[in-house]
Amino acid sequence: MVTIRRARPQDAPAMAQVHVAAWRSAYAGILPDAYLEALSATREAASYERAILARRGGHAGFVAVADAQEDAAQGIIGFATGGLARRPGLAEGEVETLYLLDDFRDRGIGRRLMRASASHLASLGVQSAFAWVLADNPARWFYERLGARLMARERVAIGGRALTQLAYGWAPIHTLLTATASTRLPR
Ligand SMILES: CC(C)(COP(=O)(O)OP(=O)(O)OC[C@H]1O[C@@H](n2cnc3c(N)ncnc32)[C@H](O)[C@@H]1OP(=O)(O)O)[C@@H](O)C(=O)NCCC(=O)NCCS
Protein backbone atom coordinates (compact mmCIF):
# COMPACT_ATOMS: atom_id res chain seq x y z
CA MET A 1 0.00 0.00 0.00
CA VAL A 2 1.11 3.54 -0.65
CA THR A 3 0.27 6.28 1.84
CA ILE A 4 0.69 10.04 1.54
CA ARG A 5 1.94 12.13 4.44
CA ARG A 6 3.58 15.48 5.10
CA ALA A 7 7.34 15.50 4.45
CA ARG A 8 9.73 15.82 7.38
CA PRO A 9 13.30 17.13 7.26
CA GLN A 10 14.68 13.60 7.67
CA ASP A 11 12.85 12.58 4.46
CA ALA A 12 15.11 14.86 2.40
CA PRO A 13 17.73 12.19 1.44
CA ALA A 14 15.04 9.79 0.15
CA MET A 15 13.28 12.63 -1.68
CA ALA A 16 16.59 13.53 -3.30
CA GLN A 17 17.06 9.93 -4.51
CA VAL A 18 13.60 10.02 -6.11
CA HIS A 19 14.37 13.45 -7.62
CA VAL A 20 17.56 12.26 -9.30
CA ALA A 21 16.03 8.97 -10.53
CA ALA A 22 12.90 10.72 -11.88
CA TRP A 23 14.93 13.44 -13.63
CA ARG A 24 17.24 10.89 -15.27
CA SER A 25 14.23 8.93 -16.50
CA ALA A 26 11.76 11.70 -17.40
CA TYR A 27 14.26 14.11 -18.94
CA ALA A 28 16.40 11.63 -20.91
CA GLY A 29 16.57 13.00 -24.44
CA ILE A 30 15.17 16.35 -23.24
CA LEU A 31 18.07 17.56 -21.07
CA PRO A 32 21.74 16.91 -21.92
CA ASP A 33 23.07 13.52 -20.72
CA ALA A 34 26.04 15.17 -19.01
CA TYR A 35 23.74 17.44 -17.04
CA LEU A 36 21.60 14.50 -15.88
CA GLU A 37 24.70 12.47 -14.99
CA ALA A 38 26.02 15.33 -12.87
CA LEU A 39 22.88 15.56 -10.72
CA SER A 40 23.82 15.04 -7.10
CA ALA A 41 21.48 13.43 -4.58
CA THR A 42 23.61 14.92 -1.78
CA ARG A 43 23.12 18.43 -3.14
CA GLU A 44 19.40 17.91 -3.72
CA ALA A 45 18.97 16.47 -0.22
CA ALA A 46 20.47 19.59 1.33
CA SER A 47 18.15 21.76 -0.73
CA TYR A 48 15.01 19.77 0.17
CA GLU A 49 15.95 19.73 3.84
CA ARG A 50 16.46 23.51 3.86
CA ALA A 51 13.10 24.09 2.17
CA ILE A 52 11.19 21.76 4.53
CA LEU A 53 12.75 23.39 7.58
CA ALA A 54 12.31 26.99 6.38
CA ARG A 55 8.63 26.65 5.37
CA ARG A 56 9.05 29.91 3.47
CA GLY A 57 5.86 31.06 1.74
CA GLY A 58 3.91 28.20 3.30
CA HIS A 59 6.21 25.76 1.49
CA ALA A 60 5.43 22.11 2.29
CA GLY A 61 6.23 18.70 0.90
CA PHE A 62 4.14 15.54 0.72
CA VAL A 63 5.72 12.13 0.35
CA ALA A 64 4.25 8.91 -1.03
CA VAL A 65 5.47 5.99 1.09
CA ALA A 66 5.28 2.36 -0.03
CA ASP A 67 4.97 -0.24 2.70
CA ALA A 68 6.69 -3.62 2.89
CA GLN A 69 3.98 -5.27 0.76
CA GLU A 70 5.23 -3.41 -2.31
CA ASP A 71 7.69 -5.62 -4.20
CA ALA A 72 9.35 -2.91 -6.30
CA ALA A 73 10.53 -0.66 -3.49
CA GLN A 74 9.88 0.33 0.06
CA GLY A 75 9.90 3.76 1.63
CA ILE A 76 9.54 7.06 -0.18
CA ILE A 77 8.70 6.44 -3.85
CA GLY A 78 7.43 9.88 -4.79
CA PHE A 79 6.71 13.37 -3.55
CA ALA A 80 5.35 16.82 -4.34
CA THR A 81 6.29 20.20 -2.92
CA GLY A 82 4.74 23.64 -3.17
CA GLY A 83 3.70 26.85 -1.50
CA LEU A 84 2.90 30.43 -2.40
CA ALA A 85 3.91 31.17 -6.00
CA ARG A 86 7.61 31.97 -6.30
CA ARG A 87 6.80 34.84 -8.62
CA PRO A 88 3.65 36.92 -9.09
CA GLY A 89 1.40 37.03 -12.14
CA LEU A 90 0.24 33.52 -12.95
CA ALA A 91 -1.54 32.18 -9.87
CA GLU A 92 -1.27 32.55 -6.11
CA GLY A 93 -0.04 29.06 -5.28
CA GLU A 94 2.51 26.84 -7.00
CA VAL A 95 3.19 23.12 -7.14
CA GLU A 96 6.96 23.29 -7.49
CA THR A 97 7.88 19.62 -7.80
CA LEU A 98 6.10 16.33 -8.47
CA TYR A 99 8.15 13.18 -8.99
CA LEU A 100 7.54 9.45 -8.80
CA LEU A 101 9.82 6.46 -9.32
CA ASP A 102 9.01 4.82 -12.68
CA ASP A 103 7.59 1.64 -11.12
CA PHE A 104 4.95 3.64 -9.28
CA ARG A 105 3.60 5.70 -12.16
CA ASP A 106 0.10 5.32 -13.53
CA ARG A 107 -1.39 4.05 -10.28
CA GLY A 108 -3.12 7.23 -9.21
CA ILE A 109 -0.30 8.31 -6.86
CA GLY A 110 0.46 11.49 -8.81
CA ARG A 111 -3.16 12.49 -8.51
CA ARG A 112 -3.11 11.81 -4.75
CA LEU A 113 0.04 13.92 -4.32
CA MET A 114 -1.61 16.73 -6.31
CA ARG A 115 -4.62 16.46 -4.03
CA ALA A 116 -2.44 16.77 -0.92
CA SER A 117 -0.68 19.79 -2.44
CA ALA A 118 -3.96 21.42 -3.50
CA SER A 119 -5.48 20.94 -0.04
CA HIS A 120 -2.38 22.46 1.52
CA LEU A 121 -2.43 25.44 -0.86
CA ALA A 122 -6.14 25.98 -0.22
CA SER A 123 -5.42 25.94 3.53
CA LEU A 124 -2.97 28.79 2.96
CA GLY A 125 -5.88 30.75 1.49
CA VAL A 126 -4.73 30.81 -2.12
CA GLN A 127 -7.46 31.00 -4.75
CA SER A 128 -5.51 29.59 -7.70
CA ALA A 129 -2.48 27.40 -8.40
CA PHE A 130 -0.13 26.42 -11.19
CA ALA A 131 2.83 24.22 -12.06
CA TRP A 132 5.62 24.56 -14.60
CA VAL A 133 6.23 21.65 -16.97
CA LEU A 134 8.65 21.34 -19.86
CA ALA A 135 6.75 21.35 -23.15
CA ASP A 136 8.53 18.12 -24.18
CA ASN A 137 7.51 16.31 -20.98
CA PRO A 138 4.44 14.07 -21.40
CA ALA A 139 3.56 15.00 -17.80
CA ARG A 140 1.80 17.99 -19.38
CA TRP A 141 -1.00 15.60 -20.36
CA PHE A 142 -1.30 14.55 -16.73
CA TYR A 143 -1.95 18.18 -15.77
CA GLU A 144 -4.46 18.54 -18.61
CA ARG A 145 -6.18 15.36 -17.40
CA LEU A 146 -6.53 17.07 -14.02
CA GLY A 147 -8.32 19.96 -15.70
CA ALA A 148 -5.44 22.42 -15.87
CA ARG A 149 -5.53 25.30 -18.33
CA LEU A 150 -2.46 26.44 -20.23
CA MET A 151 -1.63 29.83 -18.68
CA ALA A 152 1.76 30.78 -20.08
CA ARG A 153 4.74 29.58 -22.04
CA GLU A 154 8.31 30.81 -21.84
CA ARG A 155 11.82 29.94 -22.95
CA VAL A 156 14.28 28.70 -20.31
CA ALA A 157 17.85 27.39 -20.37
CA ILE A 158 18.57 24.21 -18.41
CA GLY A 159 21.98 22.59 -18.57
CA GLY A 160 22.87 24.93 -21.41
CA ARG A 161 19.92 23.80 -23.56
CA ALA A 162 17.16 26.19 -24.64
CA LEU A 163 13.74 24.72 -23.86
CA THR A 164 10.11 25.79 -23.65
CA GLN A 165 8.29 25.48 -20.35
CA LEU A 166 4.55 25.73 -19.90
CA ALA A 167 2.57 26.97 -16.91
CA TYR A 168 -0.55 24.88 -16.31
CA GLY A 169 -3.01 26.28 -13.82
CA TRP A 170 -6.22 25.87 -11.93
CA ALA A 171 -8.36 28.91 -11.18
CA PRO A 172 -10.20 28.69 -8.92
CA ILE A 173 -8.12 26.14 -7.03
CA HIS A 174 -11.28 24.18 -6.30
CA THR A 175 -11.17 22.85 -9.85
CA LEU A 176 -7.98 20.99 -8.85
CA LEU A 177 -9.52 19.73 -5.62
CA THR A 178 -12.48 18.42 -7.60
CA ALA A 179 -10.31 16.81 -10.29
CA THR A 180 -8.24 15.00 -7.68
CA ALA A 181 -11.14 13.93 -5.47
CA SER A 182 -11.97 10.76 -7.38
CA THR A 183 -11.19 7.64 -5.43
CA ARG A 184 -9.37 5.20 -7.64
CA LEU A 185 -8.72 1.91 -5.86
CA PRO A 186 -5.02 1.58 -4.99
CA ARG A 187 -3.16 -0.95 -7.10
C1 LIG B 1 3.68 13.08 -13.96
C2 LIG B 1 3.49 12.04 -12.88
C3 LIG B 1 3.71 12.64 -11.51
C4 LIG B 1 2.03 11.52 -12.97
O1 LIG B 1 1.77 10.67 -11.89
P1 LIG B 1 1.03 9.28 -12.07
O2 LIG B 1 0.85 8.68 -10.73
O3 LIG B 1 1.73 8.47 -13.10
O4 LIG B 1 -0.39 9.74 -12.66
P2 LIG B 1 -1.83 9.17 -12.18
O5 LIG B 1 -1.80 7.69 -12.24
O6 LIG B 1 -2.22 9.81 -10.90
O7 LIG B 1 -2.73 9.72 -13.37
C5 LIG B 1 -3.85 10.59 -13.21
C6 LIG B 1 -4.54 10.69 -14.56
O8 LIG B 1 -3.63 11.31 -15.49
C7 LIG B 1 -3.42 10.46 -16.59
N1 LIG B 1 -2.02 10.58 -17.00
C8 LIG B 1 -0.93 10.43 -16.23
N2 LIG B 1 0.19 10.60 -16.95
C9 LIG B 1 -0.23 10.85 -18.21
C10 LIG B 1 0.44 11.10 -19.43
N3 LIG B 1 1.78 11.14 -19.50
N4 LIG B 1 -0.30 11.30 -20.56
C11 LIG B 1 -1.66 11.26 -20.51
N5 LIG B 1 -2.36 11.03 -19.36
C12 LIG B 1 -1.64 10.83 -18.24
C13 LIG B 1 -3.72 9.06 -16.09
O9 LIG B 1 -4.07 8.20 -17.15
C14 LIG B 1 -4.87 9.32 -15.14
O10 LIG B 1 -6.06 9.44 -15.89
P3 LIG B 1 -7.51 8.84 -15.37
O11 LIG B 1 -8.12 10.04 -14.71
O12 LIG B 1 -8.18 8.45 -16.60
O13 LIG B 1 -7.26 7.73 -14.42
C15 LIG B 1 4.45 10.82 -13.05
O14 LIG B 1 4.22 10.24 -14.30
C16 LIG B 1 5.92 11.20 -12.96
O15 LIG B 1 6.48 11.22 -11.88
N6 LIG B 1 6.57 11.48 -14.09
C17 LIG B 1 8.00 11.74 -14.14
C18 LIG B 1 8.39 13.03 -13.45
C19 LIG B 1 7.71 14.23 -14.04
O16 LIG B 1 7.70 14.44 -15.24
N7 LIG B 1 7.12 15.04 -13.14
C20 LIG B 1 6.41 16.25 -13.53
C21 LIG B 1 7.39 17.38 -13.59
S1 LIG B 1 6.56 18.89 -14.10
Image: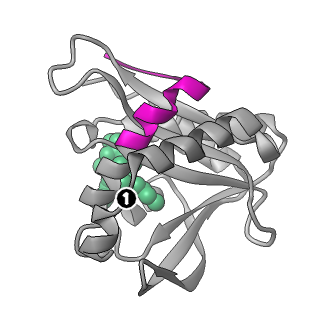
Residue 155 visible, this orientation: yes
The residue under label 1 is: 39
Pinpoint residue 111: horizontal percent, then vertical percent: 44, 40
Tell me which segment is drawn in magenta.
Answer: 1-17
Amino acid type, mark 1:
Leu
Task: Using the rendered view, name the quadrant where residue 32 is placed.
Answer: bottom left
Q: In the image shown, does 57 or 144 lie closer to the viewer? A: 57
What kind of element bears circle 1? loop
Q: Residue at x 47, y 83 (%)?
A: 164
| Residue at 33%, 74% in the rendered image | 31
Q: Residue at x 27, y 63 (%)?
A: 37
Q: Residue 185: image x %, image y %?
A: 32, 23
The answer to whether 22 is drawn above or below residue 160 in the figure is: above
- Of 110 and 156, the residue lying toward us: 156
Q: Is residue 29 above or below residue 187?
A: below
Is 109 inside the magenta-drawn segment? no
